[in-house]
Amino acid sequence: MSAPDTNIEKQTRRHSPALLGIGTVVVAILAFILLAPLAPDDDATPPPVAATETN
């Protein structure tokens, strides 16, 4: 059963901060998923060349 007297405008005002927070988290997660493969790898630099001893 639903409540007999519901004020949709009042509920919209009260829930808007929570919905805005949820939307922000969803956008951040999607951005991470889409942009993570484009990030450079840490192993992109070649290893240093070993110095050889000369006499």
Image (spheres, helix red, strand yellow):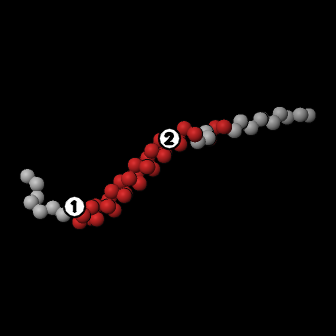
Q: Nearer the viewer, residue 51 or 55?
A: 51
Between the residue at mark 1 and the residue at mark 2, the CA separation in whole angstroms equals 36 Å
Quarter of the figure with residue 39: top right
**What residue appears at the point 27 percent right and 65 percent down from the top-left corner?**
14
Judge depth for marks 1 and 2 and give the one in front: 1
Q: How many marks?
A: 2
Q: Is residue 6 above or below residue 46?
A: below
**What residue appears at the point 38 percent right and 53 percent down from the top-left corner?**
23
- Does dot 1 land on a helix, a strand or a loop? helix
Residue type pointed to by label 1 = Ile
Q: Residues within 10 Å of mark 1 (few under 14, many from 20)?
A: few
Q: Nearer the viewer, residue 19 or 37?
A: 19
Q: Which mark is residue 39?
A: none
Instruction: Give the position of the C terminus as an image quadrant.
Output: top right
Residue type pointed to by label 2 = Leu
Q: Is residue 55 left or right of residue 48?
A: right
Q: Is residue 14 above or below residue 26?
A: below
Q: Which mark is residue 8?
A: 1
Task: Tell me if label 1 and label 2 are in contact, CB under 8 Å.
Answer: no
**What residue appears at the point 64 percent right and 37 percent down from the top-left corner?**
43
- Does dot 2 land on a helix, a strand or a loop? helix
Q: Is residue 20 left or right of residue 35?
A: left
- Label 2, on which residue? 34
Residue 5 placement (x, y as % from top left): 11, 63
Q: Is residue 23 left or right of residue 10?
A: right
Residue 33 placement (x, y as % from top left): 47, 41
Earlier sequence position, callout 1 versus callout 2: 1
